[in-house]
Image (spheres, rainbow, N blue to C red):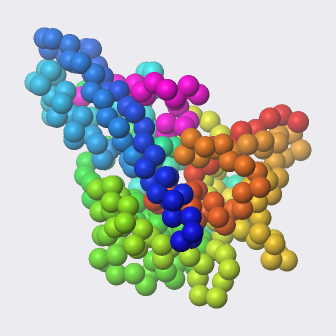
């Protein structure tokens, strides 16, 4: 991995331009100018909520200021979080795909699924202070809950890669360093610990399985499938091999995208997992299909 540190750095520095605008029904007086932010593709939208809320609060009716903040894109609530419970362990996986709603959607994944192909303009999102859609969203009231979710994802990923042996050997300070490195956008701080999670265990040449989440539409429901980075004979699998596994007699996987990048089909899965995974240690791939 040391030879590809530049790749890790480029992925880390990927950003999204977002234009936040207020709900016109909540504004009192002068309509505020939009609030523009560049946020990391690797982060979570709730991590910038306080900053956006502070900007708009001076323009919002006082009766709404204590409400739970939520966002929408083109009238659709952004499904950022779901009730926490039942994190998957290896026995829950099978060779057949498992469809799951995510607890929290990463900013980069959300952007790739929702934003038009023309990414030269900021992504426009509306912030709301009232009428929280409780039938569709779940309130995330603290960064502690977000951190708990993040650490659960890390543990799940390590169970897949190393049977959980690496993450369980880490100390609390290592977990804190990972989280703070992500929250504060500190590449060296984060990777000083994360590199241990991104190396095959002991004398192994690859991970046991690839932590993988596959998306095919814009409702953020993903598919998890138990995928090994190598064939039984020891040959390394490529993205083309993964797409062959995902294809059916009536539907063929024809392309994959992550971090806004269309991936070459000859890219090895092990390399992808080590270099293109999000900080939760999962590969989040948007898969394109065509009917056969």
Q: Is residue 223 visible?
A: yes
Please state if 97 lies on the left or on the right of 9 as rendered.
Answer: right
Residue 171 appears at what percent x and percent y? 34, 81
Q: Which residue appears at 27% of the width and 40% of the height?
A: 49
Q: Which quarter of the picture shows residue 183?
A: bottom left
Please state if 246 lies on the left or on the right of 2 as rendered.
Answer: right
Q: Which residue appears at 52% of the width and 78% of the height?
A: 164
From the image, which quarter does the C terminus lie in?
top right
Residues 256 and 188: in front is 188
Q: Which residue appears at 72% of the width and 62% of the height?
A: 268
Q: Which quarter of the picture shows residue 19?
A: top left
In the rendered image, the residue lying farthest to the bottom is: 203
From the image, which quarter does the N terminus lie in?
bottom right
Q: Is residue 16 magenta?
A: no
Note whether 149 is above or below 114 in the view shown.
below
Q: Is residue 94 visible?
A: no
Which residues fall within the magenta stretch? Answer: 110-129
Residue 253 appears at what percent x and percent y? 78, 44
Q: Is residue 124 magenta?
A: yes
Q: Across the whole image, how many numbered discs are drawn on residues?
A: 0
Residue 256 appears at what percent x and percent y? 68, 45
Note whether 225 is above or below 107 in the view shown.
below
């Amino acid at each position: 991995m040391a030879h590809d540190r530049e790749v890790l750095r480029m992925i880390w520095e990927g950003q999204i331009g977002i234009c936040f605008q207020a709900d016109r029904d909540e504004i009192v007086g002068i309509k505020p100018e939009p609030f523009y932010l560049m946020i990391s593709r690797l982060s979570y939208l709730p991590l910038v909520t306080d900053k956006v809320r502070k900007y708009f609060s001076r323009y919002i009716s006082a009766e709404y200021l204590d409400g739970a903040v939520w966002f929408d894109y083109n009238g659709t609530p952004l499904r950022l979080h779901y009730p926490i419970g039942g994190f998957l362990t290896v026995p829950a996986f099978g060779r057949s795909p498992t469809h799951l709603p995510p607890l929290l959607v990463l900013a980069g994944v959300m952007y790739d699924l929702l934003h038009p192909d023309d990414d030269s303009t900021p992504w426009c999102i509306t912030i709301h202070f009232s009428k929280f859609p409780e039938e569709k969203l779940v309130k995330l009231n603290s960064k502690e809950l977000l951190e708990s979710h993040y650490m659960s994802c890390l543990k799940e990923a390590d169970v897949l890669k190393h049977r959980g042996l690496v993450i369980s050997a880490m100390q609390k300070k290592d977990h804190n360093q990972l989280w703070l490195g992500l929250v504060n956008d500190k590449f060296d701080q984060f990777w000083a610990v994360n590199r241990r999670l991104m190396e095959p265990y002991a004398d192994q040449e690859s991970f046991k399985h690839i932590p993988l989440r596959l998306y095919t539409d814009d409702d953020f429901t993903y598919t998890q499938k138990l995928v090994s980075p190598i064939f039984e004979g020891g040959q390394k699998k490529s993205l083309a091999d993964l797409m062959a596994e995902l294809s059916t007699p009536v539907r063929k996987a024809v392309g994959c995208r992550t971090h806004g990048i269309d991936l070459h089909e000859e890219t090895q899965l092990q390399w992808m997992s080590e270099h293109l995974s999000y900080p939760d240690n999962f590969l989040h791939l948007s898969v394109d299909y065509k009917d056969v």
